[in-house]
Structure formats: C-alpha cells, structure tokens
Image (cartoon, helix red, strand yellow):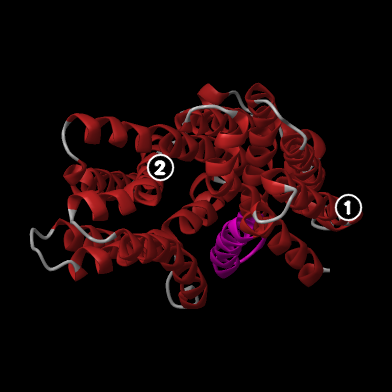
Amino acid sequence: MYALLLTIIYIAFISLGLPDSLVGSGWPVMQRDLGVPLSYAGIITMTISVGTIFSSLMSDRLTKRFGTGMITAVSVLTTAIALYGFSISNHFYLLVLWAIPYGMGAGAVDAALNNYVALYYASRHMNWLHAFWGVGAAISPNIMAYYLLDASGWQGGYRAIAIIQIILTGCLFLSLPLWKANGLQETLDQTEVKPFKETLRLKGLSFMLVTFLAYSAVEQTTALWATTYLVEGRGIDVETAARYGALFFVGITAGRFLSGVVTRWFNDRQLIRIGLAVLCGGVVLILIPTDIQIFSLIGLVIVGFGCAPIYPAIIHATPTNFGAVNSQAVIGLQMAGAYVGSTFMPPLFGLLANNISVTIFPFYLAFFALLMVVMSERFNRTMKNK
C-alpha cells in the first residue's frame, strides 16, 4: 500500500510539471493565431499565479475539510478542465478566464502533496518527487512541439495534456482509500484551522517565507533571463546560450536526483546549506569580469545544481520545524511566498535591465542568494534558541 500510494504521488508530481511549460512553448504560435501582442503572455501567467497564490493560502482550510486525497484528485481535475478549456479557445480573453481555474488547481495540489510527503515520506522522496516535476516540465514542450507541426496546432497540445490529466484524475479518485490509511492524517484533518495571523506568528516563519521568496526569485529570474544575459551581456552566440540555458534546468533535475541519494548522510538543514554554498559559487563564476565565456556558462549550470536541494529540503523540514499540526498552513504560506517571488521578481529584473543594463543579471542573483543565506541562517539561530 505504501509503495502503491508513493507511485501515484510520483505520477502526480510529473502531472504537476506538465502544464507549467505549455504557455512558454506554445506562445509564439498562440500569439500569432490570436492576434495579440507578444507581451500578452504575461497576462496569462500572472492570472495563473494569482489563482495559485490564492489556492495555496486556502490549502490548510480545504485539506483539513476534505482530506489530501480528495483535494489532490479535485485539483488535478480542475486543472484538466482548464487545459481543455485552453484547447477550445479562439479568443485571448477566454484563455485569461480559463487561467483562473488553471492556477487554482495547481496551487491546491502543490501545497497538499508537498505537505503529505513532508509528513509521511523520507527526505529522499521529496527530492526525487521534485525532480519528477522537472521531468514533467521537460516533457510537455516536446508534446507541444509535436502538435505544433500537426494540423491541430497548439490547441491539440493542450488537449493532449488535458487527456493525460483526466486519466490521472481517474487514478487519483480510485486511490482515495489509500490516502486515509494513516491514522495521523485523520487526526490532522480534524484539527482546527488557525487564522493566518496566528500562523504568521509562529517563531521563525517570517525568515523562512523571505527565504522562499528569494529562492523563487533566483530560480525563475535565471530561467527567464539567463539566455538573454549570455547573448546581450556576454556576447555569446544564441545557440550556445540557449543550450546552456536549458542545462540550468538539467542541473536542477539532476541535482534533485543526486540530493535524494545523499540524504542518507545529510539532513535537511545541511542540504540547504550545501545548496546555498553551491548556488553562491555558481553566481561568483557568473560575476567574474572576464572575456573567458566558459566561467559564466559553467556558473549557470552550477546555480542549477545549487538550487536543487533547497526547495525540497525546506518543505520536508516544515513538520519538524513548525509541528505536524501547523505544517499544512505553513506550507501553504511558503508556496504563496514562492509564487510571489516567481511572479514578480523576474519582471522586476526586466524593468531594471531596460533602464540600466542586462549586465546587472549576476548582481541581481547575488542579492537574492545572499538574502537567502542571511534569512535561512537567522531562521536556524531562531530555532536553536526556541
């Protein structure tokens, strides 16, 4: 039963990653077909993010009322319906409307699954599960690319991912009895939902929320702007820059598989510190003022490896740091903080790059990397004195 449910959760994490790359991979064709400016992609992604933040904040209330299994199944179904809605939309405003349930479904299942795994599974599974999210995010652009060459176009790509999600929804509903096999889950589902103000007063939580925001700022700013920086800031050819930009994601995915292996020797706090040290080392390489391009290219991959263990380790340590009763509410707040960072910090860099120079890219990463170090260490000292 343990292995069967874990397999279902692994598949669910792949499913979580599948929709995340669709807008970016399909937008060049979608934008042309819909007759809207290229920048309108930001409206869709911002709408998705708002829905995700809202459902993350509501995850504690929803999960304690309906249970993790039901929330996961309904959330994936909601996402599947939204993806199908994308596939039948011929106007931009319809995509914006469908983006609302798209984001709400993604946020609820993300927070619920992360909490469940943090409570019941070892740290290695948290790392490997997030690596499988990367697998899903890497698969979907290839599915979209296949359909872009077909007569059904980008709508066919969305339809294919929606069908995959619907099949997964069926599996999740069939698996509902497995989710309540653990008595602790039933106990947690019956606990009282705390107001946000009370949860925010938990000792050390504010430091961890800033750490999450800073992490997402580094990850998503690198994902969005690294290739542009390499081309315009370092004079590297577009093909090489794009290849190393993709290797950043390979670094995250491979790093999480590796982190899962080394959890037998390192605990969550040690993994976070190792990840931060590696990340900062990668940023230093990108910062080196030299015409030797290999430093910035290798630095980008190392930043990916550094990012790998941080997010899963923070999530996995949440029940230990804040208590099992508080973990769902705390993880919901952490997810919301992460989405705020990923939503607003990359556009902020774009604004700064337009008004200053794209060459501030490594300094921007350095600021948030150092912010992570300071906040996580302040959190550690706070918990030590707790």
- Could you tell whether 250 is left or right of 49 in the image? left
Q: Residue at x 47, y 71 (%)?
A: 254
Q: Position of residue 88 (x, y in %)?
A: 77, 35
Majority SS type along the magenta span: helix
Residue at label 1?
Answer: 170
Asked where in the image residue 86 lies, by quadrant, the reply is top right
Residue at label 2?
Answer: 208
Residue furthest to the front:
151
Q: Residue at x 30, y 44 (%)?
A: 375
Quadrant in which the C terminus is drawn: top left
Between residues 192 and 98, which one lies in front from this camera angle? Answer: 98
Query: Under tag 1, what secondary structure?
Result: helix
Asked where in the image residue 326 lies, by quadrant, the reply is top right
Q: Residue at x 41, y 67 (%)?
A: 251
- Could you tell whether 95 is left or right of 239 in the image? right
Can you say whether 261 is above or below 145 in the image?
below
Q: Which residues are magenta?
A: 117-142
Instruction: For residue 289, say whether it is visible.
Output: yes
Q: Position of residue 44 (x, y in %)?
A: 56, 31
- Could you tell whether 186 is left or right of 198 in the image? right
